[in-house]
Image (cartoon, helix red, strand yellow):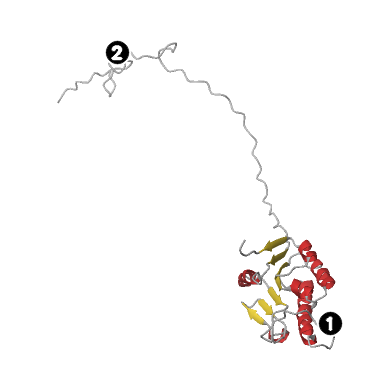
Amino acid sequence: MTASLLNPSMPTGGVPSGAGPAGGPRSHGPGRPHGAAAAAPVAAVAPTAPVAPRPLALVPPAQTEGLLQVHTAPFRGSFSGVFSQALRSAGLGSRVLISQFLKGGVDQGLERSLWLCGRLQWLRPAMPACLTEPADAEPEGPGAQEQEAVLEVWGYTQRQLLDGAVDLMVLDELGLAIALGYLPAAEVEATLEQRPAHLDVILTGPSMPPALLAMADQVTQLRRNC
């Protein structure tokens, strides 16, 4: 049997109890008593009452309010960008009506209006050509048919606007139709004043009466060679 050479009074680590790293007496620091180390005092924490969870409350969405916007330019070029916006809105599910009051050449009218994306109705008057001249003052004059075609488009547009049947309405060359005498200014202004709160209306064209500009929430003017 092999005899153990370890000192029974020595811990397993090989350093005598009470000795420092080099075998000397262990230092307890200045002012610290020998023996067991003094424990730091612990502040007493008062118990807190449990907090009841707050009930979840749904925040109602903000009411969407439609805008009356004007896109105008001294040249005929303000419609194309707005048309892209209208087509994108229809593709996302909005109901859209585009009414071009002085654009002819396709003999469209109410009966042959175009539908895009299943939600965008594109309407032009039933005329063989575009209108650039003032309306004929005579009820039975040479421009009476064109006047009636423009009024047909306006009457349908007016009903759709007042009924709130669409979400976005683009009225192209509305101001020019007023300036040329095809549409009554007072009736157009009164109709736009009565538009439903949710409806966005965009007016485009090279001519815009001051009264419509004053009603607009936003006016965008395109410029060329500035």
Mark yes or no: residue 165 visible: no
Percent x, y for residue 183? Answer: 80, 76
Determine the image quadrant of residue 80: bottom right
Determine the image quadrant of residue 217: bottom right
Which tag, 1 or 2, sits closer to the chain's start? 2
Percent x, y for residue 81? Answer: 62, 69
Quarter of the figure that contains the C terminus:
bottom right
Secondary element type, mark 1: loop
Residue under the point 70% across and 75% down: 97
Residue receiving disc 2: 24
**Which three-letter amino acid code belongs to the residue tagged 2?**
Gly
Residue under the point 67% across and 46% down: 54
How far apart in space, not on screen, are marks 1 and 2 (Cα)?
123 Å
Query: For mark 1, does the 10 Å Cα neighbourhood hold few (<14), some (14 to 19), or many (20 or more) residues?
Result: few
Q: Is residue 108 above or below residue 2?
A: below
Q: In this view, does 174 lie to the left or right of 81?
A: right
Query: For mark 2, does the 10 Å Cα neighbourhood hold few (<14), some (14 to 19), or many (20 or more) residues?
Result: few
Percent x, y for residue 212? Answer: 78, 66
Front tag of 1 and 2: 1
Residue under the point 26% across and 21% down: 14
Mark yes or no: residue 29 visible: yes
Residue receiving disc 1: 137
In this view, the residue in front, 203 or 9, is: 203
Q: In this view, does 58 lie above or below 39?
A: below
Secondary element type, mark 2: loop
User: Seen from this angle, which residue lies furthest left?
Assistant: 1
Quarter of the figure that contains the N terminus:
top left
**Which three-letter amino acid code belongs to the residue tagged 1?**
Ala
What label does residue 42 carry, if any?
Answer: none
In this view, the residue in front, 29 or 121, is: 121
